[in-house]
Amino acid sequence: MIPILSGNVASALGSGFDVDNSGRFNRADSAFLSRSASSTSNRRTFTFSAWIKRSRISNADATQFLFGTQTDSSNRFDIGLHNANNLVVKEKLSGTTNIDFTTNRLLRDPTAWYHIVIAIDTTQSTESNRVKIYVNGSQETSFADSNYPDEDYDTLVNVSGRTYTVAQEGGNNYYFGGYMAEVCLIDGSQLAPTSFGEFSEDSPTIWMPKDVSGLTFGTNGFYLDFQNSAELGTDVSGNSNTFTENNLAAADQATDTPTNSFATLNPLWRSNYDNDGLFSEGNCKLTFTAANSDRGYGFSTMGVTAGKWYWEVKVLEVTRASTGVGDANAIAGFSNPFYDETPSKGMQVGTSGTINENDTSTSYASALSNNDIIMYALDMDNHRCWYGINGTWQDSGDPTSGATGTGDMTTKISDQTHINTGEFILPFVFDASTTGQASFECNFGGCSGFDVSSGNADGNGYGDFEYAPPSGFLSLCTKNLGSDGG
C-alpha cells in the first residue's frame, strides 16, 4: 500500500512514541478551542508546537489560523496558513506590524502530517535569532516577508485577560480545516524542534514525534493531546490551562495521527468538473450540489496493489449515488472511466444495486436508501472485491472465500483487468447525476464522516468501524504498511 501523494510518513516507521489521538476541526462548523489567560507571564520568550494534517486546502477566501489572540485587526498575534498556503507568523500592535513572516514554502499536501514550531525570544541581541520557524524539523530561511521584532519587544502572547484560540483567529472567520495533534505552548523558553521530534535512524529524512510530557511548560503553557473525547481542550501539561470547546463533539476525536495516518478523500484529486463537490469533516464527507449539472468523483488518498482492505461509506443522498474502486489511470483525465471505456478502469455499484461496466448494467445488490452504510472488502491478493449494506454482504458474499470469490463484484462483470494489472486501486465515490445530487460520508477508520455507534477495529487493532472488518482485512492506514496486508 502506498499513499498516492508522499508526505511525512513517520507513521510507517513504527517509532518508539505513538500519538494516540488528534482533534478534527471542521471549518464549516466554525470549530475551535479558546482560553482566557488568568495571569501575565513571559511575553518575550515562548515556543508554539503543533502537528497538523490539512483537509481544507486554501484558496482566495480561506486563510486558516492555528493559534493566536486578537482584540481587533490592529491588535493581534497569529500563527496560521495564508490563502496561498504559506505559513504566516504576524503580530500587530496599535496598527503597527512588529512581527511579520510569510514562508515561501507552501504547505498544501492533504496526505501529510506537518510539524510546525514557532520559537520566539525577543531578548536575543542577534535579530535573526528572535523568531525561528521550523517545518518537519528543518528551519525555514526563505521568506516572502520577514520583519523581526525589536530587542526586548513584549508580544501579545501570555497576557492576562486576553483570549487565546486554537484553530481560529479570534474575532474573524479564519478557521482551520483539518486535524491537529500534540499542540503545545512553552511559556518562557525558545526551544528547538528536537524538543518535540526527531529524525528516524532508519530513514533520516523522516521527522517523527517525541514524548513531550516531560517538558517545562511555564505558567501559561499547555499541552493538548486530544485523548479526552468529552473535553478535547483538556490541558495535560499539569497547568490545568484547559481550553473551551466551540462547535466540537466527541466524534471529532480522531485516531488519524502523525504516527498513524489514515486514508481520507483527496480534495486535490477529484473530478474534472469545477466546484462540483464540497469536502468537509476532515475530508471524510463529500457533498455534491443539485445546482451543478455535472457529475463528479472523489478518490481516496491511498491506493493499493496488494493486501486485503476494508472501509465504509454512508450514503446520505442516494439520488444517482455510486461507490466503487478504480485504478490510478482512472484519475489521470477524469473522463468517465466506468461506463464507456474498454477495458473498464474500475467497477462501481449504483443506487439501484447494479454493477456498471462499459455502459452495461448487471444486477448485483439491493437498492440503496438514504443513510444506508455500505461496506467494502477489497482483496488485491486474489483480485476480488465484496460489497455489503448495513452489515450484510450482498449476493451471499463471503470476503474470506479468497480466490473462490463467493458473491464478489468481479464475478458479475466480464473484464477483470481493472484490478489485475498492477495498477494502484483506490476507493471512490461518484455522483452520476446531471439533475440531482449525491452526498457521502466515508469511514476509512481514522475519523469517520458519520457517527459510529458500535466500534470495531481491524485485526491489527486499528480503525473504528460500524461493522467488523472480515478476518484478514485491514484499514487503509500507514501502520498497516508492511503488515500481513502488504
Image (cartoon, rainbow, N blue to C red):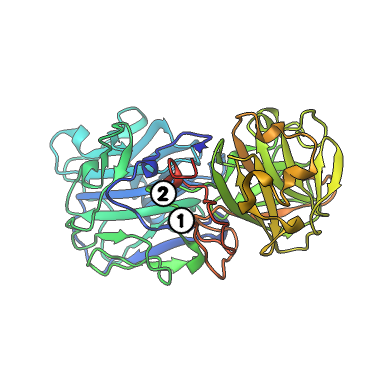
Residue 319 image point, x, y percent: 81, 55
Instruction: Name the residue nearer the viewer: 301 or 425.
Output: 425
Is residue 466 in sight in this rendering? yes
Residue 67 image point, x, y percent: 37, 53
Q: Is residue 255 left or right of residue 435?
A: left
Task: Give the foreground label among 2 and 1.
Answer: 1
**The furthest residue to the front:** 404
Count numbered badges in the picture: 2
Instruction: Name the residue nearer the viewer: 41 or 105.
Output: 105
Say if 248 sits above or below 113 in the image: below
| Secondary structure of the residue carrying numbered label 1 | loop
Q: Amino acid at mark 2?
A: Asn
Q: Amino acid at mark 1?
A: Tyr
Residue 122 image point, x, y percent: 19, 43
Instruction: Name the residue nearer the viewer: 175 or 407.
Output: 407
Residue 182 image point, x, y percent: 33, 54
Residue shown at the point (40%, 66%) measured from the top left:
232
Is residue 176 in sight in this rendering? no
| Secondary structure of the residue carrying numbered label 2 | loop
> What residue sits right under mark 1 in the picture?
462
> What residue sits right under mark 2 in the picture?
260
Q: Quadrant of residue 12?
A: top left
